[in-house]
Amino acid sequence: MRHRNLFLNAFLIALYSILVCIISSCSSSSDDLSIYSPDNNIALNSGDMDFPSPMESDRGWGSGKYPWHLIDGLRAPCYWEYGLAFTGGYNEYIDTCGWRQATINFGEPKRFNRVVIWHNFGEAMMESYFIRYWDDDANCWKTAVHAKNVQQRIETYKSDFKEVFSQIKSSNPIPVEDIFETVTSSKVRYLFNNCNIKHGWLYEFEVYYDKPGERPECLVVK
């Protein structure tokens, strides 16, 4: 029964993606704000198994408790029960508030220098967060980005994203995007504290290696 439900879920996601791509002329260009992440997203895995894997992420709850949604490529789902909604937050859903994380394990070392995290529109309320990568030699996490003044950043573009995604009748996701010096690592982590926000709810975790000369055209947030 479980396998049948997983198959049905995967089928519905694929069908929805195809239909929206046909309707909205979806492509991998950031100018088009596609609901689907491009093929060069090295975290992409629509198979719910093997690598890349999101299964080292913190647990979710309620309508957002399936970590594999983070890497299936769908940025803007068309229904409520999607993504990874963290426990805690200022109302302490299921658990006390505190540090929460989503981790992608590539299964082998990968080069990357850009991360895009797609949030539920009403849940991207944190003022700071970390992008970390696993140092395989030192056997510890290291910080690639410590983002601050996040709300100030989001205010500069959130209305544009809301307008575009509302036109294609999907949910209204909002991305945060960070670029940094190229690292080589088998894992990447998004880390934040949710004690001062509702709880945090992620739709998609994208990771890229941008070659020299590919920016700014490849960026999601221009």
Image: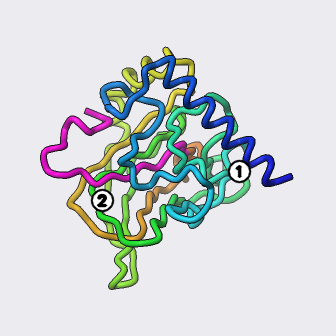
Q: Residue furthest bottom?
A: 138
Res 61 label: 1
Which contiguous range is marked in magenta?
Answer: 202-222
What residue is shown at x 60% (from left), y 53% (from top)? 47
Is 221 magenta? The answer is yes
Residue 124 lies, with reference to residue 99, above or below; the image says above
Q: Residue at x 60, y 36 (%)?
A: 14
Q: What is the number of callouts on the image?
A: 2
Q: Amino acid at mark 1?
A: Trp
145 on left or right of 5: left
Residue 126 lies in the magenta stretch: no
Q: Within the image, what quadrant is residue 214 found in? A: top left
Kind of residue at disc 2 = Phe
How far across and down, in percent of the image, does residue 136 sit?
A: 37, 80
Q: Which image quarter holds the C terminus?
A: top left
Residue 210 rendering spot, x and y as whole percentages: 24, 50
Query: At which x and y percent is residue 85?
Result: 62, 47
Front of the two marks 1 and 2: 2
**Drawn side of residue 68 relative to residue 220, left or right:** right
